[in-house]
Each structure stands twice: as C-alpha cells, then as structure tokens.
Amino acid sequence: MGCESCGMPMTNPKDHGGGKEGNKYCKYCSDTSGKLKSREEVKEGWVKFSMNSEKISRKEAEKNVDEEMKQMPAWKK
C-alpha cells in the first residue's frame, strides 16, 4: 500500500501515519494522530526530500512535486 498523499510505500505499521496500520497516509504526510497535514506542509517536506535525494534545485523540486501531487488521490481536488 502506498501513501495517498505522496506515494511512499508503507510496508510496516510504523510507516503509517500515527503508527496506525491501514491509515492511508504515511508518517511524513500526517501528524502524530494520523491526520493528513496541510498541502503546504506536505509539499514543503517533499520538496526538501527531493532536493536532498535527487540533488536538484528548489525550483526544479517544486515543479516536480507539484506535478506528482496532482496525481495523488489526496490532492486531486
């Protein structure tokens, strides 16, 4: 099962938001109770992750993340 906010694979219960297996959001996209964070909070975390892991500029990371978020069930609205 992948996070409906960012697509991260959630293979262990601790990967799920709030440590609640079955939560459709990962621990990075949700608060400690398992509730989905705001779009802005999720985007900022994802941008920082992308910049570090892919060694790309903030501008490029923001563009990529915006495109990816459009595909995620949590952000299709």
Image (cartoon, rainbow, N blue to C red):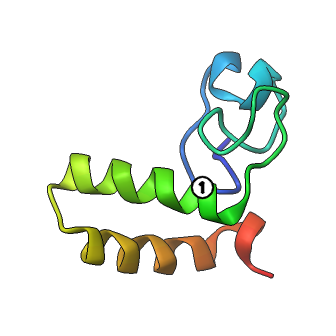
Q: Where residue 68 sits: x, y (%)?
A: 50, 72
SS of the residue under disc 1: helix
Residue pictured at 74% horizontal, 79% vertical = 76
Residue that label 1 marks: 42
Residue 63, quarter of the rendered image = bottom left
Residue at the extreme left of the image, as rendered: 55
Residue 43 locus on image (x, y percent) = 54, 62
**Depicted 19 relative to depicted 41: above or below:** above
Going 66% across and 38% down the picture, which residue do you hit? 26
- Residue at 57% x, 53% y: name it: 7
Q: Residue 32 falls in which quadrant of the image?
A: top right
Q: In front: 53, or 41?
A: 41
Residue 32 is left or right of residue 3, and the answer is right
Observer-nearest residue: 25 or 40? 40
Q: Quadrant of the N terminus?
A: top right
Give x and y (percent) for residue 52: 23, 47
On screen, 77 above or below 62?
Answer: below
Taking 48 as reference, is 32 above or below it?
Answer: above
Total number of numbered discs in the rendering: 1
Q: Is residue 58 visible?
A: yes
Q: What's under tag 1, amino acid-wise?
A: Val
Question: Would residue 45 be found to the left or right of residue 38 on screen?
Answer: left
| Residue neighbourhood size for the residue with mark 1, other residues' Cα within 10 Å, grouped as few (<14), some (14–19), many (≥20) | some
39 with respect to 51 (left or right) = right
Query: Which image quarter is the C terminus in?
Result: bottom right
Residue 6 in sight in this render:
no
Residue 44 position within the rendered picture, expressed as x and y whole percent measured from the top left: 49, 58
